[in-house]
Amino acid sequence: MEYGTGEGMNDLDAILERLERNEEIARKFFEVEVTILSVLNFKDLFERLLTEIREKFAIPYVWITLTEEGDLAPLIPVLFDSDVVRQRLSVVSRDTLLGLIGSSREPILVNEDLSPFYKLFPDHEKYLIRSLALAPITLNGDVVGTLNLGDASPDRYVPGMDTTLLKRLAIKVSVCLSNVVAHERVKLSSSRDEVTGLLNARAIEEILAREFQRAIRYENTLSVILMEIEDQVSHESKGNLPREVAGRVAKEMRSLVRVTDVLGTYKQGEFVVILPSTTKKKAMKLLERLSLHISENPIQVEDNSIELRLKGGIASTEDAGVIDARSLVRRASEMLARQRRGGK
């Protein structure tokens, strides 16, 4: 009895091989999902996700794109504490991301004309990509980013390929993200200034110490701006300004600093901005921009228009005598004191 031709057996072998390969891929996706499901730390979630995918699937280019607006904004600076994530993270506006992927929650595969997607690449990275997969990540129903996989081969991610497993992973990442954000909000609430909602002095000191060590390790420049807000009429400083005014000032400042900068309050009621990888000259430009914006935009409280003035002192790891985070802040405080004396 003849059970099949040689050609038929070859076809069967090919089918079995393909099924075995698909089962292996599904198993790896499942292992990634299991790894991230137990994580309740924002930084750890993305560290594990990026590492697991790159290692298990031998994908040369794996990175995360997040939008700079919305519920994730206060948490994004934490990701720059991770050497793993920092190099594989891009932060863009929501309009930029949705302009490329639209409103669909389905993964997108591209292997032609990838140039529009270059704006999603991490800064300073030159990825030699000829095919790309983007899986939307959501938070509370809104797209807040994408998980991006790239390859030098144009055949790895071809439009029309089955993306079921990638979509399932993106959904699991979104669920994990929701849990992590809820957990991180509880932690953040204890490190926030009640009046402004910004990071308090304790949190700022911890971050500054960490950023100083990183600047030394990677031979980057770290700058700090210490600022005081003053009512031009009453000459009350930030510590004595009405709560609503101080809160509104904080909101204005948040709109002007970069997502990688760290804005907070300090011990005597001052505002502080930590500027990683920023020279003193660039810090001065930011201070000028902040000062101009504050002076040109009075705060409206009921029927009153409160005109404010900003004074600031800048210090940098470029400065002589700056040997640690404390001396960096001390130098900025000295510069602020000089401004209080009228620049003398």
Image: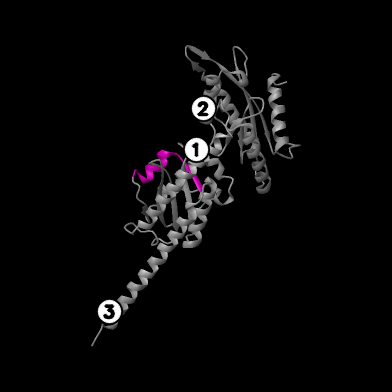
Disc 3 marks which residue? Answer: 8
Q: Residue furthest left?
A: 1
Inspect the magenta stretch and tell me whether residue 102 lies in it.
Answer: yes
Task: Give the distance between the C-alpha atoms of the residues marked 2 and 1, in whole angstroms.
Answer: 13 Å
- The dot on residue 251 is 2
Indicate the position of residue 106 as horizontal and vertical percent values.
Answer: 34, 50
Task: Give the distance between the C-alpha atoms of the residues marked 3 and 2, in whole angstroms.
Answer: 70 Å
Given residues 179 and 54, the one toward you in this image is 179
Say if 91 sits above or below 197 in the image: below
Inspect the magenta stretch and tell me whether residue 311 lies in it.
Answer: no
Q: Residue at x 35, y 47 (%)?
A: 105
Q: Earlier in the sequence, mark 3 or mark 2?
A: 3
Q: Quick one: SS at disc 3?
A: helix
Label 1: few (<14), some (14–19) or many (≥20) C-alpha neighbours in 10 Å: some
Given residues 289 and 22, the one toward you in this image is 22
Indicate the position of residue 135 as horizontal and vertical percent values.
Answer: 40, 51
User: In what quadrant of the picture does the C terminus appear?
Assistant: top right
Disc 1 marks which residue? Answer: 73
Q: Amino acid at mark 3?
A: Gly
Contact (CB < 8 A) between labels 3 and 1? Answer: no
Magenta stretch bounds: 89-103
Label 2: few (<14), some (14–19) or many (≥20) C-alpha neighbours in 10 Å: some
- The dot on residue 101 is none
Indicate the position of residue 227 as horizontal and vertical percent values.
Answer: 63, 26
